[in-house]
Image: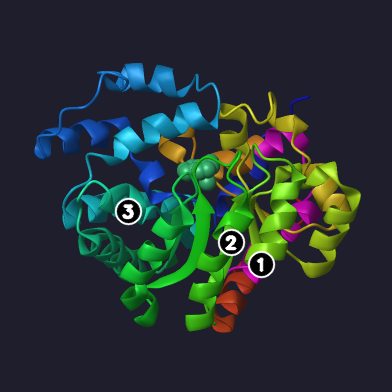
């Protein structure tokens, strides 16, 4: 089934104010920038990575699963060395997000993937934070950094990373904690102490975790019960259990869904098979996100358009998605009101046209 995605509906989806909650800054490394930074920093890339932009595009279009992608993602990261590399990467994303009318972004980064290569944490956080600030000045967008722990590494390493980044949480430079990388068999409860430790010291921070991408619904339950997260990244396998769906709706747990990622990593073989209609019918809040756009072939607007093409959503459906995305963002109430007003004005503008 394919729905029309041109004309007014395309313009509407472009203009609709968006919030992105599931975007790995390292996953925005386009092959062209990857090769440029490899040259600038004298990095020899391993044979697993294709040698040209075109070959990368072809390879990235054929990942076998999450791990196959991650193997390429960690190689990509290895070209990021200096503060300005991190700045350039993030700034290119913020510019693109702004052009998609993404007005608020909460972005992940993986400090362990850099520190374990000998990169100074100040280069990583300094470059990303400077880009966040410059994006606000230049585009008027708001942005927050969320540090992720790599779940293929032990929790003891996670605790060291938390210790190392204390000062950034204290300064309000990092706003949240997430958990990413190889989901199965690394269950969320392994990281309970990491989440407890940080939340105890910084009660205002946001907690989230990847769960229910390749892992089944029990990974989502674990993240909620043990890590006390208020948001789930991906979460599409929540559909496997009715009581969990009811819980997510009742407690208003936001799922940060990534349609093109789920297709490219073979979580589903067709975007139309994602349980988005069920989420809408059961009032499970979700946002639509790009995850790793340089690897999965599309940024946030591409993901909105892909959803429309497969589901033919109504204006009311889009209103629910846009307002849920704002309500469950980690920005302040003044910003939420500004974004909400903008959503209403775009919906009014297209009244009778869609
Ligand atoms: N790191 C970057 N993208 C990821 C994803 N989709 N799942 C788990 N870890 C990731
Ligand atoms: Zn992700």
Label 1 or label 2, whichever comes before in sequence order: 2
Secondary structure state at the residue bearing disc 1: loop
Report crowding for label 3: few under 14, some 14 to 19, many 20 or more residues within 10 A (C-alpha): many
- The correct choice, above or below, for 82 with respect to 39 in the image is below
Which residue sits at x=69%, y=31%? 271
What residue is disc 3 on? 90
Quarter of the image for the N terminus: give it.
Answer: top right
Secondary structure state at the residue bearing disc 2: strand
What residue is disc 2 on? 208
The Cα atoms of the two marked residues, 3 and 1, are separated by 26 Å
Label 3 or label 1, whichever comes before in sequence order: 3
In-front residue for pair 10/239: 239
Res 51 seen here:
yes
Which residue sits at x=36%, y=46%? 26
What residue is disc 1 on? 230
Measured as percent of width and height from the top left, residue 116 is found at 27, 49
- The correct choice, above or below, for 323 with respect to 242 in the image is below
Label 2 or label 3, whichever comes before in sequence order: 3
């Amino acid at each position: 089934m394919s729905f029309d995605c041109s004309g007014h509906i395309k313009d509407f989806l472009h203009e609709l104010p968006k919030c992105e909650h599931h975007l790995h800054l390292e996953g925005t490394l386009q092959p062209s920038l990857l090769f440029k930074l490899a040259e600038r920093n004298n990095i020899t890339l391993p044979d697993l990575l294709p040698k040209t932009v075109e070959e990368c595009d072809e390879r990235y279009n054929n990942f076998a699963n999450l791990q196959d992608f991650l193997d390429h993602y960690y190689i990509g990261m290895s070209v990021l060395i200096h503060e300005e590399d991190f700045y350039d990467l993030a700034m290119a994303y913020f510019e693109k997000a702004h052009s998609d009318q993404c007005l608020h972004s909460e972005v992940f980064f993986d400090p362990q993937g850099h520190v374990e290569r000998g990169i100074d944490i100040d280069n990583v956080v300094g470059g990303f934070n400077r880009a966040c600030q410059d994006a606000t000045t230049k585009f008027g967008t708001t942005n927050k950094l969320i540090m992720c722990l790599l779940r293929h590494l032990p929790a003891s390493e996670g605790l060291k990373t938390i210790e190392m980044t204390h000062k950034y949480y204290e300064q309000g430079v990092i706003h949240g904690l997430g958990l990413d990388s190889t989901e199965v068999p690394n269950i969320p409860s392994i990281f309970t102490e990491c989440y407890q430790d940080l939340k105890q010291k910084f009660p205002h921070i946001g907690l989230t975790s990847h769960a229910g991408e390749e892992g089944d619904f029990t990974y989502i339950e674990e993240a909620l019960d043990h890590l006390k997260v208020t948001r789930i990244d991906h979460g599409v396998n929540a559909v496997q259990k009715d009581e969990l769906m009811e819980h997510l709706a009742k407690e208003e747990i936001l799922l940060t869904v990534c349609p093109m990622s789920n297709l490219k990593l073979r979580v589903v073989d067709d975007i139309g098979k994602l349980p988005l209609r069920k989420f809408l019918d059961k009032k499970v809040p979700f946002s639509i996100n790009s995850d790793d756009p340089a690897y999965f072939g599309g940024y946030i607007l591409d993901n909105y358009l892909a959803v429309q093409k497969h589901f033919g959503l109504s204006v009311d459906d889009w209103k629910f998605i846009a307002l849920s995305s704002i309500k469950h963002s980690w920005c302040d109430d003044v910003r939420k009101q500004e974004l909400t007003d903008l959503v209403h004005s775009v919906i009014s503008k297209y009244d009778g046209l869609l």
